[in-house]
Image: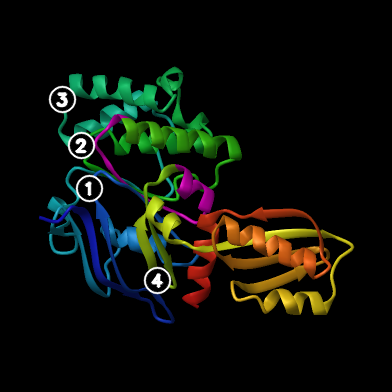
Amino acid sequence: MSSAQIEIVNLRKEYKDFVAVNDLTLSVKKNSFTGLLGPNGAGKSTTLKILTHLINATSGNAYINGIDVTSNPKDALEGIGTVVETPEFYSYLTPTQTFQYIGSIFGMRKETISAETSEILADMSMSEWADKKIGTFSKGMKQRIALGLALLNEPTAIILDEPTSGLDPRGMAEMRKILKDIRAKKDLTILTSSHMLHEVSDMCDRIAMINHGTLVKEGDLNELLGSNNARMITVKTVGGFDDAMISKLSALSNVSNVMTSGNVIKLSFKGDDEDQYQLLSEMSSFGMKVFSFNEEDALETIYLNMIKESR
């Protein structure tokens, strides 16, 4: 039996003048926190809109719990919470009233809605705003209410399209903390899109990288980081360097993609810590006066390499 709760198979979405999703295939494991990572325009939002039946694919299939979203959306999306578009609310209603209204549509009992509302608003750090009109709320507060509504019917999975988009740094940090706390508290599959590396690495345990609507890499975060033996190194020098020094550096077998700007050198490097020490020694022997030698974020290195290769 497959461990995937969400499966996308050969998905394609064509518009008149471009292809937004191009033969995309990926799996989202049950109870995973999966980040759909890619630059703006990579096809993330289009994929999630197909998955939640807001738009139809040109071809291919999307399944939730083994049920085809296109042919049987009602059953496929039963028990799935979603926030895939900018949330809109009746501005004159309070969160309590809104939860009662949406809960009644779900067919929930009034007592159950009240109990769930209290717990969810506490999880969203919104209890003190329970009886305030939503029209007075900031975007970040509305985003938390939208997430809370996605959790109201005790879903087995939630699908989120850039949940921190448009929020200020504090709002972003609060939303990430809420999502991590929910993930720790509940047996729940979370699929979220993002174009921000630090956000995905902070929250997710699995990553699917896409570009131009195509999957370029997916897997467990720790496995992806462990499999990456190419490091991005930033070197700062005193007194700069000449072309001969850069030529010698570029000629080293474990060095590639050497870029320079002022007194700074950036390069890709393959090797372990001992090899890195040897690289520093080589640079000194070339006459470079190095005062800073830093390894950049490993996920960023993987991401940039994957995007470059998929162009």
At 39% from the left edge and 66% from the top edge, which residue is drawn?
217
Displayed quadrant of residue 301:
bottom right
> Distance between the Cα atoms at labels 4 and 2?
35 Å
Q: Secondary structure at mark 1?
A: loop
> Distance between the Cα atoms at labels 2 and 3?
10 Å
Q: Residues within 10 Å of mark 3 (few under 14, many from 20)?
A: few
Q: Nearer the viewer, mark 4 or mark 2?
A: 4
Q: Nearer the viewer, mark 2 or mark 1?
A: 1
Task: Identify the disc placed on residue 109.
Answer: 3
Q: Are marks 4 and 3 in contact (CB under 8 Å)?
A: no
Give the residue pinned by disc 1. 30
Task: Identify the disc placed on residue 213.
Answer: 4
Camera-side residue: 80 or 112?
A: 80
On the rendered image, what quadrant is the N terminus found in?
Answer: bottom left
Give the residue pinned by disc 2. 105
Q: Are marks 2 and 1 in contact (CB under 8 Å)?
A: no
Q: Earlier in the sequence, mark 4 or mark 3?
A: 3
Image vertical order of residue 296 relative to residue 125, above or below: below
The magenta span reads: 185-202
At 39% from the left edge and 71% from the top edge, which residue is drawn?
213
